[in-house]
Each structure stands twice: as structure tokens, then as C-alpha cells.
Image: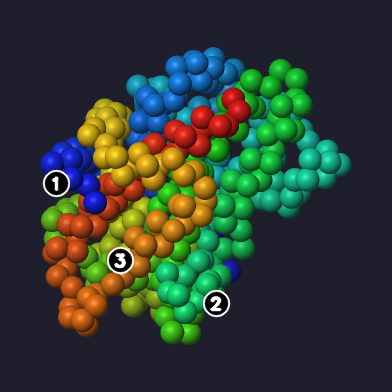
Amino acid sequence: MPLKILKSGCCSFLILCFSSLGIATNAMAYTPAIQATLFNAVMKQVPFTKSELLISKTKYLHQSLNSQEQMSMYGHGSLKVASYMYLVDFWREYSLAQVFNERGTSVSDEVLKKYNIDISLFKLPMKFFGPTNFSVSDQCSVSANQAFTYSYLDLLKEITKLQPLVNAVKNNDSLQASMFYLKAYYYQRLQLANTTHTYTNDNCLSDINGLLTCATDYVDIKAFGDERLNRMKRYQELEWNNFELSRRNRERLSTCPLTVWSYFNSAGGLEPLSDGASVSASEALSFNVSGGVLTRAKDVSINAIMKENKDILAYFYKNEDEKGNPVDIEYKTKVLSAVVLTQMQTAVYRTTNYLNGVDI
């Protein structure tokens, strides 16, 4: 890929549910297992008529899948419609144009222009979209070194703009379902601190959304255990290969057990490793939800998401209090665990409210 607080009782319950599930990482904002967990929780909240309509149209989508698309969901059938988050994750290899083509719909440049669709974005593989580079520092609005030419936010905007075109396609049930899953996936994806924001130094140079910074400088990860961290490091090395990390940066990070990027993408180091674990985790995310979460979730705007992301990431990188004293890392780690889980809860209810206004 080219580079250019919860109440204590609720918090304890959620951490227990997630910590019993094991861990894995991936080179993305929220791993597919976490995406499926969130979406499974969302589908418990949307109106029954909407979920039934999605199930109905998903049957047509399933009939249109090629062998590779089917394999991307292999073994996840018990998740039902939530298993389609694995399909959307596979679609990162595709462009939006190819998703349309596989559903039997080819769109000319003239039609794209008519609907004000960015032709280059429509034809670009989705794996080339990445986080935005807004700075957590008030001294810089964005980082001077932009990591990705196009962002997940750009992609979600284009997907949204495609809806009138999709509505105009005859016999479009498979395409309608595709667009719904794409919107859910990328909207959920935005609700992760380092997906929209990044740390910057005094020269406004960033650490590429945490890719170049070791998380152990800011949080305590001893609780993960050696076996778990070793496994995460193997995945982390794959991430570095995907991003074509320079030899200099590889050497600098060679002793880093976990980067900030991986810490957030694995939801603070926790991820379901089985479909059953995803179901349990999704139920935990809907347990004893605070009024504050429900209130925040009512605002589905990108601005609201970005403000929360900035606040969370700014707290992560804060190693001194207002008096200049060192922050207690163990205490900070516990707070961050609660914050990450609260953000996931908010993501469930905010995505629910967002999808309630989305066509299917």
C-alpha cells in the first residue's frame, strides 16, 4: 500500500467479555472480526422491517458472489448478515467499479459524470484509501506529511453519492445490499481515534497515525502476555511489509512489541477470534449502556466523530499532567481500556442511527 467513562460495573463486564476472546491484528482500522462484532450489535438495534429487508436483499447479493467473494466469508456463516463485514473487507482488493461489475452492472464514465461521481475514485482499489491526517495538536490543523492520497472519508462520501445511481438500476437488490454493507463498514471504520487523527511534532510531521510509534511509550501492555504479544508482532511485521516500511524505521521499531497503530486497530489489544466470541462481544456492547453513550450517538455527523477521535488520541499521547508531572501509565492504561470500549459502544448506537437514515 503506497504511503504518500463507563460506570465501573459496566466497564468490568465489557473488559471481561473482550479479554476472554483472544487477540489478532490487521493492517486496517478495526479488524474484520471487530467490524462484524459491531455490525452484529447494530442489527439488534435497527428496526425489524429494515433488518428483514436487508436479509431479503442479501439473498440476491449472495447469489451474485463469485468464488473468491464466497471464500472471504467461509467459516463465518453463524454470524449471518454480520458475516458480510468479511466480504466488505475482501472488497478492499476491489474498486467500487468492480463491486458493481460483479453485480452485473457496468457504469460508463458519462453516467458517472451525470451523477457527479469522481471517476478516479470509483475505479481505484479500496485498499489504497486510508486514514486522514488531522492533527491532535492545536498547532497544526493537518500533518505536513500526508500518508494517503485518499481517505476512508473520501470513500464513504463517494459510496453515499452513488445511491441515486444505484436506485436507478433495474433489478438492483444485490447492488442495494452491497452499498448498505459498504456504508456500514466504512462508517464504523471512521469511529476509531487514529482513523481520522494523528500525532504531530513541532514541525507538524506525523507518525502516520501511530504506525511509526511504539505504544509501550504510552500504555502498559504487560497484561497481554508474551504469547499474545509475539503473535501480534508477527502480524505487525506483515503490516510493515504492506506499508513498505523503510529499513531505517524497521530497525528503529525492531524492539517494539506493539505500535500505536496496532493498539487502536485491535481495539486496545482485544479482538474476538471466533464467531461465537463475536456474538458474545456484540451482546456485551449492548449491555448496561449509559445515557451519555446514547446521547452522543444521536449525533451521526462526521464532525462529532472527529472531535471524539481527537480527544481520545490526544489523551493517549499525553504523558504529563497539567502540572508537568509524569502520568501514571498503569492508571492511564485502565482509563484507555474503558475509553476504547465506550467508543465501540458509541459506534454501535451511532451506526444504528446513521443506518436508520440510509436506503436499502
In front here: 138 or 120? 138
Residue corresponding to mark 1? 8
In front here: 174 or 189? 189
- Image quadrant holding the C terminus, namely top right
Q: What is the spatial separation of the Cα atoms under label 1 and label 2, in whole angstroms?
A: 40 Å
Q: Are marks 2 and 3 in contact (CB under 8 Å)?
A: no
In front here: 262 or 183? 183
Where 113 sits versus 356, above or below?
Answer: below
Residue corresponding to mark 2? 144
Where 269 sits versus 161, above or below?
Answer: below
| Residue at the image position 42 percent from the left and 80 percent from the top | 201
Residue corresponding to mark 3? 315
In the rendered structure, the answer to whether residue 301 lies left or right of residue 283 reads: right
Q: What is the spatial separation of the Cα atoms under label 1 and label 3, in whole angstroms?
A: 20 Å
Q: Are marks 1 and 2 in contact (CB under 8 Å)?
A: no
Q: Residues within 10 Å of mark 2 (few under 14, many from 20)?
A: some
| Residue at the image position 45 percent from the left and 52 percent from the top | 305
If you read the primary sequence from the N terminus, does the residue marked by circle 2 or circle 3 appear first? 2
Q: Secondary structure at mark 2?
A: loop
Q: Is residue 188 visible?
A: yes
Amino acid identity at mark 2: Ala
| Residue at the image position 36 percent from the left and 53 percent from the top | 265
Amino acid identity at mark 1: Ser
